[in-house]
Amino acid sequence: IAQAIDAAIACFKSAVGLAASGLIELLESEVFSRRATARMLSKFVLAAWLLVAPALADLQTITSSNRSRSYWVHAPDDFQDGKTYPAVIVFHASSKLGFNIDGFAMEADVRLSLPLVPTAYSPDRYFIYPNGVGGVWAGPSYGNVSVAEDLQFVSDLISDIKSKYGIDTKRIYATGLSNGAGFVGTIACSDVGGQFAALAPVAGSFYTDANDTDCTPARSPLPILEIHGGSDKTVFYDGGQGEGGLLPAIPTWLGYWQQRNGCTSNSTVDSDSGDVHHTTWVCGGKNGTLQHWKVDENGHDWPSKTINFDMMAAGMGPQPIEANDIVTDFFDQFSLSD
């Protein structure tokens, strides 16, 4: 009961903060640009969403590295006792929401799953949305804990969900956005990555893998897919100095993984319009173990053919790809028994 009360209070505080922020933007804006208006509206909608969060979602807490940590759980919509299901762990972007609400906001942002509303992806999967300390995952200079501590949290989280839920231990996956995607890259370079069947960062800020000097994957090949906007102004496609340190160019980072996975060849398919480029590599004799999607005109967001909250906040319109389809289809190709 105490945990439910804490979650309700946290959600209420976050909702009030978001609504106040949106109201300030409304009062201070003399001209409503598309980006400003979308960002303001997304804050109001998310604020309303957070008010009902405690009744709709399952917040779990564990102790990791002597610190209380938490994560949100969305069970399969078609859950049946006695069955096991794959689990997708989704790491949020850096956030200032706090109050252990960032993971729930990520669920609302990208719509892989939704409380009370089944999606095309949620009938037969667990979706796990962990909360970073202070809304940030380790890696950038503005992180609040060490890389080792956040990696330990992931390991402890996996142990916890295995003990509490019907998880298919051979089909645990990781995806994330921006700072969360960068942390997925950090996981891939660690022993913890060996617990995942495949990983799919989106718009990743790979601070801990900028120079290919500190990466020891648990196995090779390790299935990885990355999605990035060619017009990303936050995590530049061509790399450079980011808000939290040096970032690799995305083609350079993919080159690191081509070597680590022992890939022998690659091919690229361009869309008819010429603005989407899908590259696959043959690694360990299997085509598609390493993949990349580049969307030339997309910015820093989780791309979708229909606008989601994250795209609204980024001021982006509908995109030619559906990241949710791409990520879940990729995951479905791999298990730890492969």
Image (cartoon, rainbow, N blue to C red):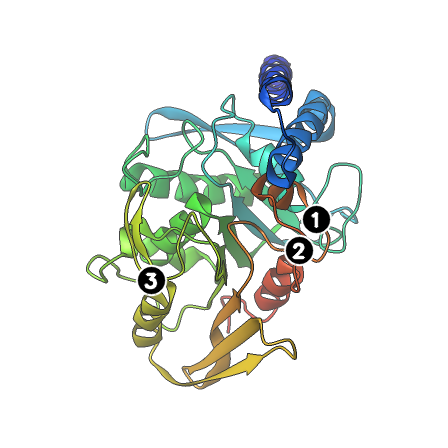
Q: Which residue is mark 3?
A: 249
Residue that appears at 26% across and 61% down:
216
Judge the density around disc 1: few (<14), some (14-19), many (≥20) Cα neighbours within 10 Å: some
Question: For residue 25, which quarter of the picture?
Answer: top right
> Looking at the image, which is closer to me, 41 or 1?
41
Q: Which residue is mark 1?
A: 307
Residue situated furthest left in the rendering? 213
Question: For residue 84, which quarter of the picture?
Answer: bottom right
Q: Position of residue 321 (x, y in %)?
A: 65, 64
Q: Position of residue 144 (x, y in %)?
A: 32, 30
Q: Which mark is residue 273?
A: none
Q: Are marks 1 and 2 in contact (CB under 8 Å)?
A: yes
Question: For residue 240, which quarter of the picture?
Answer: bottom left
Q: Which residue is mark 2?
A: 304
Q: Tell me, yes or no, if residue 275 can be seen here.
A: yes
Mark closer to the chain start, 3 or 2: 3
**Kind of residue at badge 1:** Ile
Q: CA distance from mark 3 to mark 2?
A: 23 Å
Q: CA distance from mark 3 to mark 1?
A: 27 Å
Q: Secondary structure at mark 2?
A: loop
Task: Report whether 259 appears left or right of 201.
Answer: left
Residue situated furthest front in the rendering? 30
